[in-house]
Amino acid sequence: MPRCELSGKTPEVKNKVSHSNIKTKSVAIPNVHQKRIFSSLLNEMVNLKLATSTIRSIDHVGSLDKYVLNQEDNKLSKRALALKTRMLRKLRGQKKKA
């Protein structure tokens, strides 16, 4: 099943309710795409599976780096968590030099 690696969006089980109040189970699958996004902090392209709503949120925040660094660890996938730790290490290295 598709899962967004940054926001943690997963398929959601819901009920469709008809006019006669009959409940039918259905699954709402998030719109997930394989996307290459540039990380200015790491200075490289990063491959991630992202929901389109997450892509819009990244544009709204300003950059992939800001979005990932402000995201909670429990929402991130293993790959995204590794990306976040790489970004944090890079930031710590830059602070020591300055």
Image (cartoon, rainbow, N blue to C red):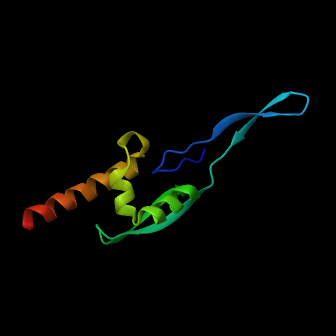
Vertical placement of 40 versus 6: above or below? below
- The quarter holding residue 1 reads top right
Residue 76 vs residue 67, the one in the foreground: 67
Residue occupying the point 35% across, 51% down: 70
Q: In this view, does 3 lie to the left or right of 76?
A: right
Residue 67 image point, x, y percent: 39, 57
Residue occupying the point 63% across, 54% down: 31
Vertical placement of 12 versus 68: above or below? above
Total numbered badges shown on the rendered structure: 0
Residue 17 vs residue 85, the one in the foreground: 17
State which quarter of the image contains the C terminus.
Answer: bottom left
Outermost residue to the right = 20
Q: Is residue 49 left or right of residue 22?
A: left
Residue 50 image point, x, y percent: 52, 56
Q: Is residue 4 left or right of residue 19?
A: left
Q: Is residue 97 left or right of residue 14?
A: left
Residue 46 image point, x, y percent: 40, 65
Residue occupying the point 52% across, 61% down: 55
Residue occupying the point 91% across, 28% down: 20
